[in-house]
Amino acid sequence: MDRYEKTAHLEWWANPSTCLARIPIRATATANTGEWDAVFSPPLDHGVRENLKQLIDADPCFTLRFDTSAVEVQTEDFDGVDHVRLTVTPEP
């Protein structure tokens, strides 16, 4: 089973021109399952965690941005501390 880890940013966009959150993460994928485990790096402080929870509750769609590419993802299993599971959103 292939596993690989990359640094990236998790972004939450209010509209096409307004990014309300850009959080550095370490994303680990297993093969080509379309799922990522993301660890916030550096860890989030309490205020940022609360803000992130509010964004996830409002809309769990984020952009997972690497150096030269980006993909839309859904957040799942936010543990409220330092970890979130991401699932790639299928293109229409």
Image (cartoon, rainbow, N blue to C red):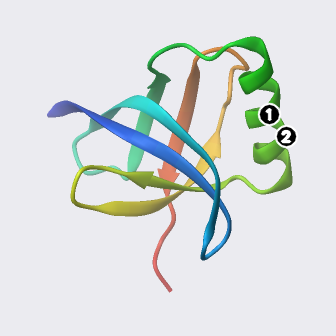
Q: In 3D space, how far apart are the residues under numbered discs 2 and 1 (Cα atoms)?
A: 5 Å
Disc number placed over residue 88 in the picture, else none: none
Q: Residues within 10 Å of mark 1 (few under 14, many from 20)?
A: few
Give whichever of 75, 22 is nearer the camera.
22
Q: Residues within 10 Å of mark 2 (few under 14, many from 20)?
A: few
Question: In the rendering, at what x and y percent does residue 43 appear?
Answer: 54, 13
Which residue is the extreme one toward the bottom?
92
> Mark 2 and 1 residues: CB-CB less than 8 Å, in contact?
yes
| Residue 69 located left or right of residue 43 | left
The residue tagged 1 is 51
Q: Secondary structure at mark 1?
A: helix
| Residue 26 located left or right of residue 2 | right
Disc number placed over residue 54 in the picture, else none: 2
Give me the residue at 45% from left, 32% from top. Answer: 24
Type of the residue with mark 1: Asn
Which residue is the extreme one toward the front?
17
| Residue 34 located left or right of residue 1 | right
In the rendered image of this protein, does residue 75 appear above or below residue 74?
above
In the rendered image of this protein, does residue 91 appear above or below residue 20?
below
Rendering quarter of residue 78: top right
Give me the residue at 40% from left, 62% from top. Answer: 71
Question: In the rendering, at what x and y percent does residue 40 appear?
Answer: 50, 23
In the rendered image of this protein, does residue 71 appear above or below residue 86?
below
Type of the residue with mark 2: Gln
Question: In the rendering, at what x and y percent does residue 6 appear?
Answer: 24, 34
| Residue 80 located left or right of residue 34 | right
Question: In the rendering, at what x and y percent does residue 23 appear?
Answer: 53, 36
Q: Quadrant of the N terminus?
A: top left
Give me the residue at 69% from left, 20% from top. Answer: 79
Q: Secondary structure at mark 2?
A: helix
Could you tell me how many numbered marks the image carries?
2
